[in-house]
Image (cartoon, rainbow, N blue to C red):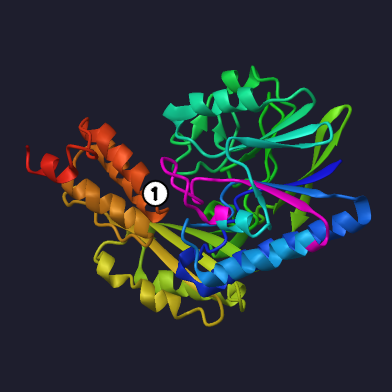
Amino acid sequence: MLIAHLADIHLGHRQYGLEERLEDYNRAFLRAVDEIVRLREGEGLDTVIISGDFFDTQRPAPSIYITAIRGLTKLREAGIRVFVTRGNHDASVINPTENPLVVLHSMGLIEYLDNDYRDLGGVRIMGVGTVYTDMQGRLINSLSRLKGGGINIAVIHQYVEGAPYVYPMPNVDVFMVNEKPLSQLGLDYIAVGHIHEHGLRHPRLNAVYPGSLEVWDVREFEVYEYVNGRLSKVKDMDPKGFLVLDVGSNGVRVRQVRLSPSRRMVRVKVRYEDAKPSTVKGDVSYIANNLDAKGSIVILEIEGTISSGYSTRDFRASELRKLFSRAWVDVRLNLERRGTAEVPQHVFGGIDEIIRQALRSRVNNDEWVNALLGVIERVRAGDEDGAFSILERLVNVPLRGARSIMDWLRGA
Protein backbone atom coordinates (compact mmCIF):
# COMPACT_ATOMS: atom_id res chain seq x y z
CA MET A 1 0.00 0.00 0.00
CA LEU A 2 1.28 3.46 -0.92
CA ILE A 3 0.19 6.49 1.11
CA ALA A 4 1.09 10.13 0.50
CA HIS A 5 1.91 12.04 3.68
CA LEU A 6 1.52 15.85 3.61
CA ALA A 7 1.42 18.51 6.31
CA ASP A 8 1.57 22.27 6.85
CA ILE A 9 -0.04 23.24 3.56
CA HIS A 10 -1.25 26.53 5.12
CA LEU A 11 -3.77 27.46 2.45
CA GLY A 12 -4.49 31.16 2.86
CA HIS A 13 -1.03 32.15 4.11
CA ARG A 14 -0.19 35.58 2.70
CA GLN A 15 3.55 35.70 3.35
CA TYR A 16 4.92 39.26 3.71
CA GLY A 17 1.38 40.46 3.02
CA LEU A 18 1.84 39.63 -0.68
CA GLU A 19 -1.03 38.38 -2.80
CA GLU A 20 1.58 36.61 -4.95
CA ARG A 21 2.70 34.51 -2.00
CA LEU A 22 -0.88 33.56 -1.15
CA GLU A 23 -1.22 32.30 -4.73
CA ASP A 24 2.11 30.46 -4.41
CA TYR A 25 0.71 28.48 -1.48
CA ASN A 26 -2.41 27.68 -3.52
CA ARG A 27 -0.33 26.54 -6.49
CA ALA A 28 1.94 24.42 -4.29
CA PHE A 29 -1.06 22.45 -3.03
CA LEU A 30 -2.45 21.96 -6.54
CA ARG A 31 0.99 20.86 -7.81
CA ALA A 32 1.14 18.31 -4.99
CA VAL A 33 -2.33 17.08 -5.99
CA ASP A 34 -1.18 16.63 -9.60
CA GLU A 35 1.86 14.65 -8.46
CA ILE A 36 -0.28 12.45 -6.20
CA VAL A 37 -2.66 11.70 -9.08
CA ARG A 38 0.36 10.79 -11.21
CA LEU A 39 1.52 8.41 -8.47
CA ARG A 40 -2.00 6.96 -8.40
CA GLU A 41 -1.84 6.23 -12.12
CA GLY A 42 1.76 5.02 -12.15
CA GLU A 43 2.18 3.22 -8.83
CA GLY A 44 -1.30 2.65 -7.43
CA LEU A 45 -1.15 5.14 -4.56
CA ASP A 46 -4.68 5.37 -3.16
CA THR A 47 -4.51 7.21 0.17
CA VAL A 48 -3.43 10.63 1.43
CA ILE A 49 -2.92 11.69 5.04
CA ILE A 50 -2.53 15.34 6.02
CA SER A 51 -1.15 15.81 9.51
CA GLY A 52 -2.45 19.26 10.35
CA ASP A 53 -2.39 22.91 9.28
CA PHE A 54 -4.19 22.30 6.00
CA PHE A 55 -5.45 25.88 6.40
CA ASP A 56 -3.54 28.88 7.72
CA THR A 57 -6.52 30.07 9.76
CA GLN A 58 -9.67 28.56 11.19
CA ARG A 59 -11.69 31.11 9.20
CA PRO A 60 -10.43 30.82 5.61
CA ALA A 61 -11.72 33.17 2.92
CA PRO A 62 -14.15 31.78 0.30
CA SER A 63 -11.41 31.86 -2.35
CA ILE A 64 -9.27 29.58 -0.14
CA TYR A 65 -12.15 27.13 0.25
CA ILE A 66 -12.44 27.10 -3.54
CA THR A 67 -8.77 26.09 -3.90
CA ALA A 68 -9.18 23.38 -1.28
CA ILE A 69 -12.33 22.04 -2.94
CA ARG A 70 -10.69 22.08 -6.37
CA GLY A 71 -7.71 20.02 -5.25
CA LEU A 72 -9.63 17.62 -3.03
CA THR A 73 -12.27 17.02 -5.72
CA LYS A 74 -9.53 16.01 -8.14
CA LEU A 75 -8.22 13.50 -5.59
CA ARG A 76 -11.70 12.11 -4.97
CA GLU A 77 -12.34 11.72 -8.70
CA ALA A 78 -9.07 9.78 -8.97
CA GLY A 79 -10.29 7.35 -6.29
CA ILE A 80 -7.96 8.62 -3.56
CA ARG A 81 -9.14 8.81 0.07
CA VAL A 82 -7.89 11.75 2.14
CA PHE A 83 -7.55 11.60 5.95
CA VAL A 84 -6.87 14.84 7.82
CA THR A 85 -6.31 15.80 11.43
CA ARG A 86 -6.27 19.33 12.77
CA GLY A 87 -3.23 21.47 13.43
CA ASN A 88 -2.90 24.53 15.65
CA HIS A 89 -3.79 26.80 12.71
CA ASP A 90 -6.87 24.82 11.67
CA ALA A 91 -8.75 25.13 14.94
CA SER A 92 -8.63 26.29 18.52
CA VAL A 93 -6.83 23.70 20.65
CA ILE A 94 -9.22 24.22 23.57
CA ASN A 95 -12.46 24.35 21.57
CA PRO A 96 -11.81 22.64 18.21
CA THR A 97 -15.39 21.65 17.34
CA GLU A 98 -16.01 24.44 14.82
CA ASN A 99 -13.29 24.38 12.19
CA PRO A 100 -13.02 24.39 8.38
CA LEU A 101 -11.99 20.72 8.22
CA VAL A 102 -15.45 19.78 9.49
CA VAL A 103 -16.92 21.60 6.47
CA LEU A 104 -14.76 19.62 4.04
CA HIS A 105 -15.66 16.41 5.88
CA SER A 106 -19.39 17.17 5.56
CA MET A 107 -18.89 17.62 1.80
CA GLY A 108 -17.32 14.16 1.51
CA LEU A 109 -13.98 15.57 0.37
CA ILE A 110 -11.94 14.42 3.38
CA GLU A 111 -12.31 12.08 6.33
CA TYR A 112 -11.63 14.19 9.38
CA LEU A 113 -9.99 12.27 12.21
CA ASP A 114 -9.80 13.66 15.72
CA ASN A 115 -9.64 10.96 18.39
CA ASP A 116 -10.85 8.57 15.71
CA TYR A 117 -9.49 5.96 13.31
CA ARG A 118 -10.11 4.18 10.01
CA ASP A 119 -9.04 0.66 9.05
CA LEU A 120 -7.65 0.05 5.56
CA GLY A 121 -7.26 -3.71 5.46
CA GLY A 122 -4.58 -4.48 8.02
CA VAL A 123 -3.55 -0.82 8.36
CA ARG A 124 -5.10 1.44 10.99
CA ILE A 125 -4.87 5.22 10.56
CA MET A 126 -5.45 7.10 13.83
CA GLY A 127 -5.82 10.86 14.04
CA VAL A 128 -5.53 13.03 17.14
CA GLY A 129 -5.58 16.83 16.81
CA THR A 130 -3.04 19.22 18.25
CA VAL A 131 -2.69 19.52 22.03
CA TYR A 132 -0.63 21.82 24.20
CA THR A 133 2.47 20.34 25.82
CA ASP A 134 0.83 20.22 29.25
CA MET A 135 -2.10 18.29 27.73
CA GLN A 136 -0.01 15.62 25.99
CA GLY A 137 -1.27 12.90 28.31
CA ARG A 138 -4.62 13.14 26.49
CA LEU A 139 -2.92 12.55 23.16
CA ILE A 140 -0.99 9.51 24.43
CA ASN A 141 -4.12 8.05 26.03
CA SER A 142 -6.13 8.57 22.85
CA LEU A 143 -3.55 6.83 20.68
CA SER A 144 -3.28 3.96 23.15
CA ARG A 145 -7.07 3.54 23.07
CA LEU A 146 -7.26 3.76 19.26
CA LYS A 147 -4.42 1.38 18.51
CA GLY A 148 -5.34 -1.82 16.64
CA GLY A 149 -3.79 -5.21 16.00
CA GLY A 150 -2.21 -4.62 12.57
CA ILE A 151 0.03 -1.84 11.32
CA ASN A 152 -0.68 1.36 13.22
CA ILE A 153 -0.08 4.83 11.75
CA ALA A 154 -0.65 7.81 14.05
CA VAL A 155 -1.43 11.19 12.48
CA ILE A 156 -0.54 14.06 14.83
CA HIS A 157 0.48 17.70 14.59
CA GLN A 158 3.14 18.08 17.27
CA TYR A 159 6.84 18.61 17.78
CA VAL A 160 8.21 15.28 19.00
CA GLU A 161 10.96 15.72 21.56
CA GLY A 162 14.36 14.87 20.10
CA ALA A 163 13.63 15.67 16.44
CA PRO A 164 16.75 17.58 15.31
CA TYR A 165 15.20 20.57 13.57
CA VAL A 166 17.45 23.26 12.10
CA TYR A 167 14.98 26.16 12.09
CA PRO A 168 13.10 26.42 15.39
CA MET A 169 9.43 27.35 15.11
CA PRO A 170 8.37 30.09 17.56
CA ASN A 171 6.04 27.73 19.46
CA VAL A 172 7.89 24.39 19.39
CA ASP A 173 7.80 24.11 23.18
CA VAL A 174 4.08 24.94 23.24
CA PHE A 175 3.04 21.95 21.10
CA MET A 176 5.59 19.32 22.18
CA VAL A 177 5.07 15.67 23.04
CA ASN A 178 7.74 13.75 24.93
CA GLU A 179 9.54 10.96 23.13
CA LYS A 180 9.38 8.25 25.80
CA PRO A 181 5.60 7.83 26.21
CA LEU A 182 5.20 8.01 22.42
CA SER A 183 7.84 5.32 21.88
CA GLN A 184 6.15 3.04 24.42
CA LEU A 185 3.04 2.86 22.21
CA GLY A 186 4.94 0.72 19.67
CA LEU A 187 3.53 2.55 16.63
CA ASP A 188 4.70 1.54 13.17
CA TYR A 189 4.78 5.11 11.86
CA ILE A 190 4.05 8.56 13.26
CA ALA A 191 2.86 10.95 10.55
CA VAL A 192 3.90 14.21 12.16
CA GLY A 193 3.31 17.83 11.25
CA HIS A 194 4.23 21.26 12.67
CA ILE A 195 7.96 21.41 11.81
CA HIS A 196 8.27 22.79 8.28
CA GLU A 197 11.58 21.16 7.23
CA HIS A 198 11.08 18.64 4.43
CA GLY A 199 12.09 15.09 5.32
CA LEU A 200 13.15 15.77 8.92
CA ARG A 201 13.45 12.36 10.62
CA HIS A 202 13.33 11.59 14.30
CA PRO A 203 16.55 9.74 15.22
CA ARG A 204 14.85 6.99 17.24
CA LEU A 205 11.20 6.86 16.19
CA ASN A 206 9.79 6.12 12.74
CA ALA A 207 8.45 9.67 12.58
CA VAL A 208 9.13 11.94 9.60
CA TYR A 209 8.03 15.50 8.89
CA PRO A 210 7.01 16.18 5.27
CA GLY A 211 7.41 19.89 5.96
CA SER A 212 5.54 22.75 4.35
CA LEU A 213 4.93 22.69 0.60
CA GLU A 214 6.21 26.26 0.27
CA VAL A 215 9.10 28.18 1.83
CA TRP A 216 7.97 29.49 5.21
CA ASP A 217 11.07 30.88 6.90
CA VAL A 218 13.71 33.29 5.58
CA ARG A 219 16.35 30.81 6.75
CA GLU A 220 15.10 28.43 4.04
CA PHE A 221 15.97 30.94 1.30
CA GLU A 222 18.88 30.73 -1.12
CA VAL A 223 21.59 32.60 0.82
CA TYR A 224 24.40 34.89 -0.35
CA GLU A 225 27.05 36.82 1.54
CA TYR A 226 28.48 40.07 0.17
CA VAL A 227 32.13 40.40 1.20
CA ASN A 228 34.83 42.65 -0.27
CA GLY A 229 32.77 43.57 -3.28
CA ARG A 230 31.82 40.01 -4.18
CA LEU A 231 28.67 37.93 -3.84
CA SER A 232 29.22 34.36 -2.66
CA LYS A 233 26.49 31.75 -2.46
CA VAL A 234 26.29 30.12 0.96
CA LYS A 235 23.38 27.72 0.38
CA ASP A 236 20.61 26.81 -2.04
CA MET A 237 16.91 27.08 -1.28
CA ASP A 238 15.78 24.33 1.05
CA PRO A 239 13.87 21.45 -0.59
CA LYS A 240 10.09 21.26 -0.33
CA GLY A 241 7.60 18.47 -1.03
CA PHE A 242 5.81 15.56 0.61
CA LEU A 243 6.44 11.94 1.56
CA VAL A 244 5.33 8.58 0.20
CA LEU A 245 4.86 5.72 2.68
CA ASP A 246 5.34 2.17 1.43
CA VAL A 247 3.31 0.12 3.89
CA GLY A 248 3.80 -3.64 3.88
CA SER A 249 4.58 -6.68 5.96
CA ASN A 250 7.99 -5.24 6.80
CA GLY A 251 6.50 -2.08 8.27
CA VAL A 252 6.50 1.44 6.86
CA ARG A 253 9.26 2.74 4.61
CA VAL A 254 9.47 6.43 3.68
CA ARG A 255 10.68 8.24 0.58
CA GLN A 256 10.67 11.92 -0.30
CA VAL A 257 8.95 13.58 -3.25
CA ARG A 258 10.39 16.97 -4.15
CA LEU A 259 8.34 19.81 -5.65
CA SER A 260 9.76 22.71 -7.64
CA PRO A 261 9.65 26.12 -5.91
CA SER A 262 7.14 28.71 -7.09
CA ARG A 263 9.74 31.45 -7.34
CA ARG A 264 13.33 32.28 -6.45
CA MET A 265 13.69 33.47 -2.86
CA VAL A 266 17.03 35.02 -1.91
CA ARG A 267 18.55 36.24 1.34
CA VAL A 268 21.65 38.47 1.16
CA LYS A 269 23.79 39.20 4.21
CA VAL A 270 25.99 42.31 4.25
CA ARG A 271 28.20 43.24 7.21
CA TYR A 272 30.05 46.53 7.77
CA GLU A 273 32.63 47.61 10.31
CA ASP A 274 32.61 51.19 9.00
CA ALA A 275 29.37 51.80 7.10
CA LYS A 276 28.91 54.95 5.04
CA PRO A 277 25.69 55.74 3.17
CA SER A 278 27.44 56.12 -0.20
CA THR A 279 29.28 52.81 0.23
CA VAL A 280 26.13 50.96 1.25
CA LYS A 281 24.20 52.42 -1.68
CA GLY A 282 26.93 51.41 -4.12
CA ASP A 283 27.08 47.88 -2.74
CA VAL A 284 23.30 47.48 -2.86
CA SER A 285 23.33 48.73 -6.46
CA TYR A 286 25.84 45.98 -7.32
CA ILE A 287 23.70 43.37 -5.53
CA ALA A 288 20.61 44.57 -7.42
CA ASN A 289 22.43 44.29 -10.76
CA ASN A 290 23.09 40.62 -9.98
CA LEU A 291 19.90 39.52 -8.21
CA ASP A 292 17.09 41.78 -9.41
CA ALA A 293 14.99 39.23 -11.32
CA LYS A 294 11.27 39.42 -12.09
CA GLY A 295 9.17 37.43 -9.64
CA SER A 296 12.00 36.96 -7.13
CA ILE A 297 11.78 37.83 -3.45
CA VAL A 298 14.94 39.30 -1.94
CA ILE A 299 15.58 39.87 1.77
CA LEU A 300 18.57 42.19 2.16
CA GLU A 301 20.07 42.17 5.67
CA ILE A 302 22.52 45.01 6.36
CA GLU A 303 24.17 45.12 9.76
CA GLY A 304 27.28 46.39 11.51
CA THR A 305 28.76 49.67 12.73
CA ILE A 306 28.19 53.14 11.27
CA SER A 307 31.18 55.30 10.33
CA SER A 308 31.87 58.37 12.51
CA GLY A 309 30.00 61.46 11.45
CA TYR A 310 26.88 59.59 10.30
CA SER A 311 23.67 58.58 12.04
CA THR A 312 21.13 55.88 11.44
CA ARG A 313 18.91 58.47 9.73
CA ASP A 314 21.41 58.68 6.86
CA PHE A 315 20.65 55.11 5.81
CA ARG A 316 17.27 55.07 4.11
CA ALA A 317 15.82 51.62 3.42
CA SER A 318 13.23 53.13 1.08
CA GLU A 319 15.98 54.56 -1.17
CA LEU A 320 17.83 51.23 -1.20
CA ARG A 321 14.64 49.39 -2.24
CA LYS A 322 14.33 51.64 -5.29
CA LEU A 323 17.58 50.18 -6.66
CA PHE A 324 15.55 47.02 -7.40
CA SER A 325 12.97 47.36 -10.16
CA ARG A 326 11.85 43.77 -10.82
CA ALA A 327 12.13 41.79 -7.56
CA TRP A 328 10.12 42.36 -4.39
CA VAL A 329 12.66 43.52 -1.79
CA ASP A 330 12.66 43.88 1.97
CA VAL A 331 15.67 45.84 3.28
CA ARG A 332 16.39 45.05 6.93
CA LEU A 333 18.80 47.52 8.51
CA ASN A 334 20.45 46.70 11.81
CA LEU A 335 23.18 49.29 12.19
CA GLU A 336 24.59 50.80 15.38
CA ARG A 337 26.66 53.92 15.97
CA ARG A 338 30.29 53.65 16.97
CA GLY A 339 31.47 54.60 20.45
CA THR A 340 30.74 53.71 24.05
CA ALA A 341 29.65 57.16 25.23
CA GLU A 342 26.31 56.98 23.47
CA VAL A 343 23.59 54.38 23.48
CA PRO A 344 23.62 52.39 20.20
CA GLN A 345 20.80 53.30 17.86
CA HIS A 346 19.22 50.57 15.79
CA VAL A 347 17.12 50.48 12.68
CA PHE A 348 15.04 47.31 12.42
CA GLY A 349 13.11 46.09 9.40
CA GLY A 350 11.20 43.00 10.60
CA ILE A 351 7.86 43.63 12.35
CA ASP A 352 8.49 40.91 14.97
CA GLU A 353 11.80 42.50 15.90
CA ILE A 354 10.16 45.93 16.07
CA ILE A 355 7.56 44.54 18.48
CA ARG A 356 10.24 42.80 20.57
CA GLN A 357 12.32 45.98 20.90
CA ALA A 358 9.26 48.07 21.74
CA LEU A 359 8.28 45.65 24.50
CA ARG A 360 11.79 45.51 25.90
CA SER A 361 11.92 49.31 26.03
CA ARG A 362 8.88 49.25 28.33
CA VAL A 363 9.11 45.86 30.05
CA ASN A 364 12.53 45.04 31.46
CA ASN A 365 11.72 41.35 31.88
CA ASP A 366 12.50 38.77 29.16
CA GLU A 367 9.96 36.30 30.57
CA TRP A 368 7.19 38.85 30.12
CA VAL A 369 8.44 39.90 26.68
CA ASN A 370 8.54 36.28 25.45
CA ALA A 371 5.11 35.60 26.92
CA LEU A 372 3.60 38.67 25.27
CA LEU A 373 5.13 37.67 21.93
CA GLY A 374 3.56 34.26 22.46
CA VAL A 375 0.19 35.94 22.99
CA ILE A 376 0.64 37.88 19.73
CA GLU A 377 1.51 34.64 17.89
CA ARG A 378 -1.64 32.95 19.24
CA VAL A 379 -3.82 35.92 18.26
CA ARG A 380 -2.33 35.88 14.75
CA ALA A 381 -3.33 32.22 14.47
CA GLY A 382 -6.84 32.99 15.71
CA ASP A 383 -6.21 31.01 18.91
CA GLU A 384 -7.88 33.17 21.55
CA ASP A 385 -7.93 30.36 24.12
CA GLY A 386 -4.21 29.83 23.72
CA ALA A 387 -3.55 33.54 24.21
CA PHE A 388 -5.59 33.50 27.43
CA SER A 389 -3.72 30.40 28.64
CA ILE A 390 -0.35 32.12 28.28
CA LEU A 391 -1.60 35.18 30.15
CA GLU A 392 -3.07 33.03 32.91
CA ARG A 393 0.25 31.21 33.42
CA LEU A 394 2.09 34.54 33.40
CA VAL A 395 -0.02 36.31 36.04
CA ASN A 396 -1.04 33.10 37.88
CA VAL A 397 -4.68 34.23 37.91
CA PRO A 398 -7.59 32.72 35.94
CA LEU A 399 -8.78 35.30 33.41
CA ARG A 400 -11.85 33.42 32.22
CA GLY A 401 -14.94 32.18 33.96
CA ALA A 402 -16.17 33.79 37.15
CA ARG A 403 -13.16 36.07 37.42
CA SER A 404 -12.75 38.01 34.20
CA ILE A 405 -9.68 39.73 32.81
CA MET A 406 -11.30 43.09 33.60
CA ASP A 407 -11.60 42.06 37.27
CA TRP A 408 -7.88 41.30 37.32
CA LEU A 409 -6.98 44.59 35.62
CA ARG A 410 -9.01 46.49 38.22
CA GLY A 411 -7.17 44.65 40.98
CA ALA A 412 -10.38 43.04 42.28
- State whether the magenta stretch is mostly helix, strand or loop: loop
Could you tell me residue 326's position as x and y percent? Answer: 56, 81
Q: Which residues are magenta?
A: 77-102
Q: Is residue 206 left or right of residue 226?
A: right
In the depicted structure, whether residue 349 falls above or below residue 328 = above
- Residue at 24% in and 57% down: 345
Q: Magenta segment: does it hold 94?
A: yes
| Mark 1 crowdedness (10 Å alpha carbons): few <14, some 14-19, many ≥20 | many
In the picture of the structure, the residue carrying the numbered disc 1 is 383
Q: In the image, what residue type sits under mark 1?
A: Asp
* Secondary structure found at label 1: loop
Q: Is residue 260 visible?
A: no
In the depicted structure, whether residue 165 falls above or below residue 144 = below
In the depicted structure, whether residue 211 falls above or below residue 213 = above
Could you tell me residue 409's position as x and y percent? Answer: 11, 43
Q: Is residue 192 left or right of residue 394?
A: right
Q: Nearer the viewer, residue 103 or 382?
A: 103
Q: Nearer the viewer, residue 325 or 307?
A: 325
Could you tell me residue 147's position as x and y percent? Answer: 68, 25
Q: Magenta segment: does it hold 92?
A: yes
Q: Nearer the viewer, residue 350 or 243?
A: 243
